[in-house]
Image: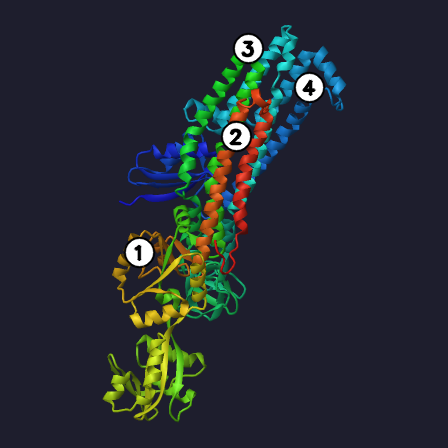
Amino acid sequence: MEGKEVILPIGGMTCAACAKRVEKAIAALEGVEKTFVNIATEKAAVTYDSQKLRLSDIRIAVEKAGYSVLETEGANALEKQEKAKKRELKIMWFKFALSALFAIPLLYIAMVPMIPFVRLPGADALDDLMMNYPLIYAVLEFALVIPPIIVGYKFYTVGFKCLIKRSPNMDSLIAVGTTAAVVYSLYNTFAIAFGDFSGVDRLYFESAAVIITLILLGRCLEAVSKGKTGAAIKKLMGLAPKTATIIENGAQREIRIAEVCVGDMIVVKPGEKIPVDGIVCEGETSIDESMLTGESIPVEKKQGDKVYAASINTTGNIRFRAEKIGNDTALAQIIKLVEEAQGSKAPIAKIADTVSGYFVPAVCIIALIAGIGWLIGTKGDWGFALNIFISVLVVACPCALGLATPTAIMVGTGKGAENGILIKSGEALETAHKIKTVVLDKTGTVTYGKPTVTDLIPLGDMDEKELLLFTASAEKQSEHPLAQAIVNYLEDGGREAVKCDKFVSMTGKGIYAEVAGSTVTIGNGKLLEDMNIDFTSAERGYESLAESGKTPMYIAINGKLQGMIAVADVIKPTSAEAVQRLHGMGIEVVMLTGDNKKTAEAIAKQVGIKRTLAEVLPQDKSEEIKKLQREGKKVAMVGDGINDAPALALADVGIAIGSGTDVAIESADIVLMHSDLNDVPTAITLSKKTIRNIKQNLFWAFGYNTIGIPVAAGVLYSAFGLLLNPMIAAAAMSLSSVSVLLNALRLKFFKVKKNEKV
């Protein structure tokens, strides 16, 4: 049985070690097949066997680990999660402000007497208090440190709990460091009370208060930055209307979108958004579907046509029957796709995961060794050793390592979604930057996939309008796609076909019909030969049309050649430009098609493709992909997501051209909503930029810890007198995480210029 997949919003996580702890707690459950917890999105993606495990069991495991699972069910779940995050951010800012309110005066009281060369306001009074009333001075500091400790109680409840369970996280480092500072300061306060006034120089209450305050500030800034990385999801969610007008017992009634049921008859007026997916039952209108397709021109809709949630009704009143609601709508599927991509893990993330797994315990050991080492080296200077111990604990930052990859993936996939490029996973995003060969399906990818009349050439005494009328009237009886293209060409000009009295179809040759008292013969040379109609004067033109990738047909009326008409699957205007951009990036472009070699090569030549694989059956397309991969190339397959599914699945990256249908979304790693080949080089460029950003983040995260921990441990103190104060260490730790987030946010300015080389 295939595992059930679920994405759970997790509350209470603060760093990469937290994410790892939640991941371990879920993975330990019997029936869990796969799990990944993303610290950037604060969500857990879990695949589990629903026969062995219930969702409630996963919730309990998360809660036992010290965290919570936020609401995921119900129509307003996403809205409630958003409100909960905003409320949590407000509480975080309040906690920071309250902690700062006490930490700043405490820092002032503690540090002013230590700076004799600058006489700040109140310095004399504080000197007098410290020298003559040391116990009052110590108790005052202790009183001021209590509120920050209360405000930061979660550092202790979570941190020590994780430490006891032998899976320490960032909270553990803060809890141990600040507790050591407070306990040592309390010891010296008691020493003062018993007459040892030298203890007044060994008070570190301000270190604990300022560290807590700075960490709280860092987490507030992180939360704000994380909120910006999820902007793409918020934009997509904001597209959906909140209410719908249904017809009930013959009357119109406005209800909340969550109350709409499949089968409801819904009324939409001009200017309103379509609330759910459905099929038009009454009325005609034009609908702006740019949110799905990227196409700015409104689409005409009539009875029997499909409409999609969040698209905008621009002109007429329509009534439609609800077909897909809630999480089944095309918009909901897109939102789910983007969420899954942002919650997925790229292979490059394994580096940070491996390091983060050993990081916190290693930091604890280094801090302990450094503290004991300096205690021995300074012959019992507990204050100096404590400074070293706390600094090492506080400066260490698994947060920056943990945020390096997921934040960049969040912004990268979000930016792609904004531009109609839906990237389904972090793995696809990472692999795309390695692509060396792009294979393009012809029909529906390079071309529109719909036959269109390209040439109408009169060769007799009939003008173009009369010739088209006879041709389309004869073809109207045929079910062949080429015939339909000719009829559409007439109707697009605002004209209607006339009645056809007799119709005969001759397979492989063409048709014979009687229209308005005249005989009409349309087909190839073989048909005209059978009818003894001379067409030798037009043979060269016929061949020229065929060589350019078109399907030409002779038109004879009353036994005399009157003209030729050519139908072709027209090339998309952006195809040649896309191929040129890919070549400019050093990527080989191959066209793969089941069409005949002559037509395929003609199309390839027009768009600038040099390598063509023609007359390939759908079942053999995947074998052609294998052959290219055996050449040692990373291959991307671009197709329509239906008959190309095997090749899309086998390619290193499958890219579906489509307008967000279920089939297109399921069949590929990347979906191009605009159905524009130009988005292929754009997707590859976005991948390159995102991977570059991840590498920069990892470099700075590793670099920060590589430099910060030795400095905090006092390695440079003996030689250069360089020592890291615990408070400066706390500020640096917070800023390192924020800097990684800000670097990831640079991807929001991603914009590809035409013919850009990366």
Task: Describe the element under mark 2 as helix, strand or loop.
Answer: helix
Under mark 2, the amino acid is Ile
Distance Cα–Cα, label 4 vs label 3: 23 Å
For disc 3, the marked residue is 379
For disc 4, the marked residue is 114
Give coordinates of residue 57: x percent, y percent: 36, 35
Going from the N terminus, do you reach mark 4 or mark 2 first?
A: 4
On residue 628, the disc is 1
Under mark 3, the amino acid is Lys
Contact flag, marks 4 and 1 (Cβ < 8 Å): no
Dot 1, crowdedness within 10 Å: few (<14), some or many (≥20)? some
| Between 672 and 43, the one nearer to me in the picture | 672
Q: Residue at x 52, y 22 (%)?
A: 713
Q: Residue at x 34, y 38 (%)?
A: 54
Under mark 1, the amino acid is Leu
Can you tell which quarter of the image residue 216 is in? Answer: top right
On residue 707, the disc is 2
Under mark 4, the amino acid is Met
